[in-house]
Amino acid sequence: HYYITNNLSVMRIFLILSIIFGLVALTAADKKCDSLEKGFKDCLSKGFKPKKLEGCKSGAGKMEKTDVKKCAKIEKKVIKKCDFSCDDEDGGEDGGDVREPFVPAAGSHYLVKKMDAPGAGQVVTAFSADKRNSESYFMATTENSDGPIPWKIEKASCNCQDECSCYKFTFRVKVTCCRYMYFAMSAHSDTLDNGDGRVIVHKTPYKPEDESWVIEPAVNGYKLKKAQGRHEGKYLVARVQRPGSGTRDTMFADITADSSAASIWDFETVAT
């Protein structure tokens, strides 16, 4: 009887110790994941562009190659050991699902439509009154009835630090009965008082690096980020009203380093 009782006591001790060690291990794993996730988010804020994780918000800035390699290792660890997902964070924060990567159909044209306020439902265009010089115009948003631009979206050259899909947004304007001029979405070199840049449509072919954009999946739409060249890593945003735009509240299209302020866009197929 003593042997059985004593044996049971030993088993209880082992069970208690196992639970304690298990809890200690889980706590250590949680702390490790907290550290990895914090490190990965720091990488994103510095401009790191993930190779595998989708829906992550990368800040502006250009990283050194050694830092890119370091962040790539952190990304692998945070996926393998912590099952981390940027999609989960975006979905939980905004109450929606992150879109699948956008793939434009060959030969199709699209309206680029603003999905968030202010100006939800407006589309991207360029007014003749906003002429910058003989080869470019400042870009703006407008109601669908005010001459929206049918954009052709095609793959562009990209020398990003990591794999990415860069796109070129172009449209054409009929000049005479037999001649067209082609324009591309680009960015002006100037910086506004609030730190934003101003987006333009420029006669193309221009500088390839200034015509490259990343279409970044987001909740309820996409963010457009400058892939390289002027204002690299900054996001397309429309929030400054055009002077004299009246009751239609048309806005200039600018570019910002604040990914959280980036406008959400969608692409609507249109006949040309």
Image (spheres, rainbow, N blue to C red):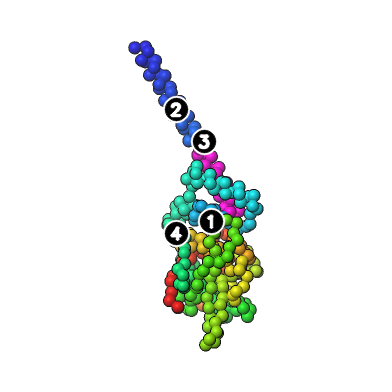
Q: CA distance from mark 4 to mark 3?
A: 35 Å
Looking at the rendered structure, the kind of residue marked 2 is Ser
Q: CA distance from mark 2 to mark 1?
A: 41 Å
Q: CA distance from mark 4 to mark 2?
A: 44 Å
Does residue 2 show up magenta in the picture?
Answer: no
Numbered marks: total = 4
State the residue position of label 4.
100
Looking at the rendered structure, the kind of residue marked 3 is Ala
Q: Position of residue 79 (x, y in %)?
A: 50, 46
Q: Earlier in the sequence, mark 1 or mark 3?
A: 3
Mark seen at residue 44: none
Q: Earlier in the sequence, mark 4 or mark 3?
A: 3
Mark seen at residue 28: 3
State the residue position of label 2.
18
State the residue position of label 1.
57
Q: CA distance from mark 2 to mark 3?
A: 15 Å
Q: Give the magenta part as a residue range.
A: 29-48
Quadrant for residue 128, please give it: bottom right
Q: Earlier in the sequence, mark 4 or mark 1?
A: 1
Q: Position of residue 81 (x, y in %)?
A: 50, 42
Q: Horizontally, is 75 left or right of 19 in the view?
A: right
Q: Is residue 133 above or below residue 71?
A: below
Q: Nearer the viewer, residue 257 or 118?
A: 257
Dot 1 lies on which element? Answer: loop
Q: Earlier in the sequence, mark 2 or mark 3?
A: 2
> Taken as a whole, is the magenta stretch helix, strand or loop?
helix
Does residue 32 show up magenta in the picture?
Answer: yes
